[in-house]
Image (cartoon, rainbow, N blue to C red):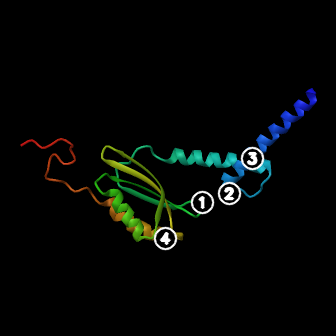
Amino acid sequence: MAAKKHSDAERRRRLRINCQFEALRTILPNLIKQDKASVLGETVRYFKELKKLVNEIPTTPSLEDSLRLGQCKNRDFARVVFSCSDREGLMSEVAESMKAADAKAVRAEMMTVGGRTKCVLFVQGVNGNEGLVKLKKALKPVVNRKPEATNNNNAGSLLPQQQ
């Protein structure tokens, strides 16, 4: 009786492990071989690559305007990272520029600190170097545009103006 329980428990354990390997096989982007050793090796390599990418990303917007574009490894997406002065309508301008370059954002991460905005976009529809160049030409004027000064000292305030 104890041997049967042990055998059933072992079968359930193997089934759980195999399900976890199957899940890893579906999420690893560059998996060539399907055996367990290859899956584990690729998982470790991919995890280290992601950790390195996370460490390279600055946590706050830079003080200088910047625009960087690059093709993602799976070639389906381009990655756009820019930092510029925050202003009203910035993201609308970015969306219009991307539309003009036949690109579509599928994911966006944005942070605004101290009047500066940093944005990371993952974009579809950018094919090869020509597409990257076209997108960069469309976005560069938006990123480099300075916010317009207003004559109203209370601009952006939620408080009513005193008369």
Badge 1 local density, few (<14 within 10 Å), some, or many (20+)? few
Residue 94 locus on image (x, y percent): 37, 61
Q: Give the distance between the C-alpha atoms of the residues marked 4 and 2, in whole angstroms.
A: 24 Å
- According to the picture, the residue beneath numbered tag 3 turns out to be 21
Circle 2: element type: loop
Q: Give the distance between the C-alpha atoms of the residues marked 4 and 1, in whole angstroms.
A: 16 Å
Q: Earlier in the sequence, mark 4 or mark 1?
A: 1
Type of amino acid under label 2: Asn
Q: Give the distance between the C-alpha atoms of the residues marked 3 and 4, in whole angstroms.
A: 37 Å
Badge 2 local density, few (<14 within 10 Å), some, or many (20+)? few
Q: Which mark is residue 131?
A: 4
Q: Earlier in the sequence, mark 3 or mark 1?
A: 3
- According to the picture, the residue beneath numbered tag 2 turns out to be 30
Who is closer to the viewer here, 129 or 106? 106
122 with respect to 35 (left or right)? left
Type of amino acid under label 3: Phe
Q: Give the distance between the C-alpha atoms of the residues marked 2 and 1, in whole angstroms.
A: 9 Å
Q: Are marks 2 and 1 in contact (CB under 8 Å)?
A: yes
Q: Earlier in the sequence, mark 3 or mark 2?
A: 3
Residue 88, located in which quarter of the rendered image? bottom left
- Residue displayed at 57% across by 64% down: 76
112 with respect to 6 (left or right)? left
Residue 38 locus on image (x, y percent): 76, 51
Q: Give the distance between the C-alpha atoms of the residues marked 3 and 1, in whole angstroms.
A: 23 Å
- According to the picture, the residue beneath numbered tag 1 turns out to be 73
Q: Which mark is residue 136?
A: none
